[in-house]
Image (cartoon, rainbow, N blue to C red):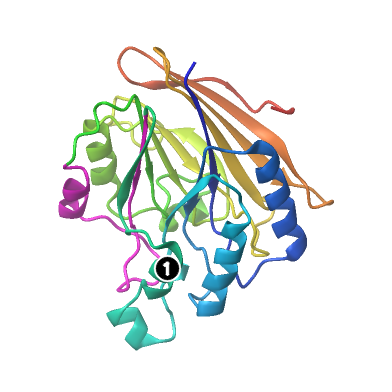
């Protein structure tokens, strides 16, 4: 069995964190020992140097797992207009030393990391068709499972968040379908949600998994959505399967499994949910 474990963290907003929550997340990640840690944006609260350095200190404590990140809208300077226009991603690049877009291949898994932010927009994310076509020029057909990661979500649980969904998402989902993307992971709204694409995008026949992570560290949580992160287990055997477990923080600042979704892929490359909302340890 070829099994990969990806910890999906989002929206830590360094500058709004509590040490008890930070320690709780570090403890559970050291226990789980994922193969890869994927961080989907809003790493800082205001893109300040001290906030990026706090993020770097946290990442340095995560152990041997590689950390792959994409920026969020909060990782672009807000008040400093000069910095926002002329070097909006300077702080991000100084810490992560990574390209804004990249393809990560880990055994039979490919993760395509995209930048849905822009210095010309404050909150909303967007993709232009030309940008997406360029990012998907390289063929990764040798990978059995493909995940796409960016900050702004493709789906949400509450109508109030519809305005926060990615602009240009209908064109984006069509392109992801053409390139046989299996799963799309994001953050931004601090309200975790897992769905299949058929509900919001019925014009796309092949079902993809849409996963939105909550905020892993920030005090800026929403009602009913404590600090959380997702653990994604990817089985790339002959019949690929994905198990997604959401870990929520409790009152003792410990992260425990709260919700589990199990998916399998059929012969048409469409994903189906085999079970959902189970409680218990994994």
As drawn, is 20 to the left or to the right of 206?
right
Query: Taking 55 as reference, is 205 above or below it?
Result: above
Residue 34 sits inside the magenta stretch: no
Q: Nearer the viewer, residue 164 or 5?
A: 5
Q: How many marks?
A: 1
Query: Taking 117 as reference, is 105 above or below it?
Result: above
Say which quarter of the image contains residue 72: bottom left
As drawn, is 106 to the left or to the right of 248?
left
- Can the viewer see residue 112 in this picture? yes
- Can the viewer see residue 226 in this picture? no
Query: Taking 120 as reference, is 187 above or below it?
Result: above
Say which quarter of the image contains residue 200: top left
Q: Quadrant of the C terminus?
A: top right
Residue at the location (40% across, 22% down)?
271
Query: Taking 44 as reference, is 204 above or below it?
Result: above
Highlighted magenta segment, given as a residue range: 109-137
The picture places residue 229, in percent across and down from the top left corner, at 61, 46
Residue at the location (32% across, 20% down)?
269
Q: Which residue is mark 1?
A: 92
Q: Nearer the viewer, residue 2 or 216?
A: 2
As drawn, is 257 to the left or to the right of 89?
right
């Amino acid at each position: 069995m070829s099994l990969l474990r990806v910890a999906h963290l989002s929206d830590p907003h360094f500058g709004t964190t509590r040490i008890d929550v930070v320690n709780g997340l570090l403890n559970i990640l050291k226990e789980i020992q994922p193969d890869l840690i994927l961080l989907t944006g809003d790493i800082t609260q205001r893109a300040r140097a001290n906030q990026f350095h706090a993020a770097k200190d946290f990442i340095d404590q995560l152990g041997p797992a590689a950390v792959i990140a994409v920026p969020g809208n909060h990782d672009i300077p807000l008040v400093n207009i000069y910095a926002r226009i002329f070097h909006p991603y300077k702080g991000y690049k100084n810490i992560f030393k990574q390209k804004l877009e990249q393809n990560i291949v880990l055994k039979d898994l490919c993760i395509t990391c995209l930048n849905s932010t822009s210095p010309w927009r404050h909150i909303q994310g967007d993709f232009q068709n030309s940008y997406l076509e360029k990012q998907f020029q390289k063929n990764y057909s040798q990978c059995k499972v493909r995940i796409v990661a960016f900050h702004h979500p493709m789906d949400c649980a509450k109508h109030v968040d519809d305005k926060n969904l990615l602009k240009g998402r209908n064109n984006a989902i069509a392109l992801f379908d053409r390139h046989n993307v299996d799963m799309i992971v994001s953050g931004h709204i601090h309200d975790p949600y897992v769905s299949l694409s058929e509900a919001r995008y019925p014009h796309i026949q092949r079902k993809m998994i849409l996963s939105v992570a909550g905020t892993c560290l920030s005090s800026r949580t929403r009602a009913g959505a404590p600090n959380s992160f997702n653990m994604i287990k990817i089985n790339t055997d002959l019949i690929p399967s994905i198990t997604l477990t959401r870990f929520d923080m409790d009152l003792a600042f410990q992260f425990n499994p709260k919700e589990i979704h199990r998916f399998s892929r059929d012969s048409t490359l469409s994903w189906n949910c085999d079970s959902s909302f189970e409680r218990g340890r994994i």
